């Protein structure tokens, strides 16, 4: 069974875009692969979060992924910092990572521009830590978005380089995971352009209350309405219909599509229906999130189970790495 490794951001509050993108595919992967899903709290330290925010965010993310359907009995779900072997492999891999190649990465240059007063070594060596996350479980496949393709390619480079330097075939060369036969739905934001994202402020979170959802949806960007029958929908309107298509029944979509085409649509009615349908879709997930957040004992047991499973895999790889490098104990 191929091994899949994927990181989970640790900034909290999954939204509809996350759910219909990565999360649904994670749920599918856990049934067919040896899947490792980790909450990347070490990566988040490059932005210096407060201890309270870091802990709270990790706890929130763990509850949200479990509420969506990630099964800790089928997949290995763990917190990155609970597996110290990752940090040690990160150190060892840094010895074979070179300044020039790290400085040229798009992620480093982008982050350096975004936080010019905090250009720390963690930003520079982010691809090395990502590589350690992947290869410590000898991953064959890694699901990545466009923004992480270069970092995955660097992980492939580091794996090959280690194998070549030490004349071994220790690490498989990980490949990007392709969701064959599945429609990857790009969920648009409520601001009329681009995809839904937390940082863009245009997202509906899975944990939002019905009141919050209604408030956000009613503020969604629209235009003055169609003036010609069957005219093409502009992006801001097509975005609303795309959201309808993922949360509403086909007859609802057809109803508003017909109204749009005959120029009788009232965007207020469409938004009210969309808000109601989003609420109906997210309510079971939100209720499960709330239940999980109220059960510290269960969240702790999941984290402990994941840490134990991940450390068993990571320690085997690290022992092999140390032996290959020549780091042998004298006692």
Image (cartoon, rainbow, N blue to C red):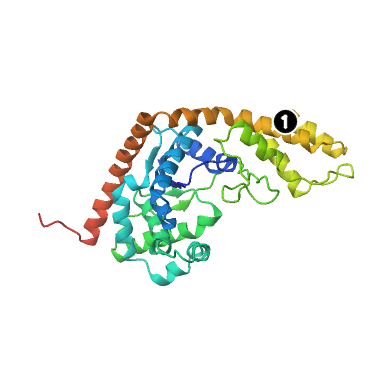
Left or right of 231: which side holds 37? left
Please give the name of the residue rendered at 56% of the width and 39% of the height, measured from the top-left corner: 19
Across and down, in percent, residue 149 comes to 51, 57
Please give the name of the residue rendered at 32% of the width and 44% of the height, measured from the top-left corner: 82
Q: Quadrant of the N terminus?
A: top left
- Number of numbered discs on residues: 1
**What secondary structure is found at the residue carrying circle 1?**
helix
128 or 29: nearer the viewer: 128
Across and down, in percent, residue 202 comes to 63, 46
Across and down, in percent, residue 289 comes to 49, 31
**Does residue 31 appear in this view?**
no
Q: Quadrant of the C terminus?
A: bottom left
Please give the name of the residue rendered at 83% of the width and 35% of the height, measured from the top-left corner: 259
In the rendered image, the residue lying farthest to the bottom is 100
The residue under label 1 is 250
157 or 107: nearer the viewer: 107
Vertical side of 84 occupied by 263: above or below: above
In the rendered image, the residue lying farthest to the right is 228
Q: Quadrant of residue 18?
A: top right
Give neighbour class at mark 1: few <14, some 14-19, many 20+ (Cα, 10 Å). Answer: few
**Does residue 107 appear in this view?**
yes
39 or 216: nearer the viewer: 216
15 or 6: nearer the viewer: 15
Vertical side of 155 occupied by 266: above or below: above
Across and down, in percent, residue 270 comes to 76, 35
Left or right of 228: which side holds 150? left
């Amino acid at each position: 069974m191929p091994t899949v490794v994927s990181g989970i951001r640790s900034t909290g509050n999954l939204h509809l875009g996350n759910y219909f993108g990565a999360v649904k595919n994670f749920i599918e992967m856990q049934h067919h692969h040896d899947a490792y899903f980790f909450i990347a709290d070490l990566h988040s330290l490059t932005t210096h979060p407060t201890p309270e925010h870091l802990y709270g965010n990790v706890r929130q993310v763990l509850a949200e992924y479990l509420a969506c359907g990630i099964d800790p009995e089928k997949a290995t779900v763990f917190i990155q910092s609970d597996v110290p072997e990752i940090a040690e492999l990160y150190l060892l891999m840094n010895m074979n990572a070179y300044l020039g190649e790290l400085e040229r990465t798009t992620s480093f240059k982008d982050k350096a521009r975004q936080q010019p007063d905090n250009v720390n070594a963690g930003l520079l060596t982010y691809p090395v830590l990502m590589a350690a996350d992947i290869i410590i479980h000898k991953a064959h496949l890694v699901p990545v978005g466009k923004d992480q393709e270069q970092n995955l390619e660097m992980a492939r480079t580091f794996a090959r380089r280690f194998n070549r330097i030490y004349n071994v075939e220790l690490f498989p060369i990980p490949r990007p995971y392709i969701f064959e036969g599945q429609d990857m739905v790009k969920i648009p934001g409520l601001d009329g352009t681009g995809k839904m994202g937390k940082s863009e402020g245009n997202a509906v979170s899975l944990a939002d209350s019905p009141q919050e959802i209604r408030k956000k949806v009613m503020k969604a960007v629209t235009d003055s309405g169609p003036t010609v029958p069957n005219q093409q929908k502009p992006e801001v309107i097509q975005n609303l219909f795309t959201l309808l298509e993922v949360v509403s029944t086909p007859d609802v979509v057809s109803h508003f599509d017909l109204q749009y085409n005959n120029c009788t649509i009232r965007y207020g009615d469409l938004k009210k229906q969309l808000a109601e349908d989003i609420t109906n879709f997210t309510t079971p997930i939100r209720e499960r999130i709330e239940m999980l957040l109220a059960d510290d004992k269960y969240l702790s047991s999941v984290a402990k189970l994941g840490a134990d499973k991940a450390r068993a895999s990571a320690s085997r790889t690290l022992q092999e790495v140390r032996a290959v490098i020549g780091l042998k104990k004298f006692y």
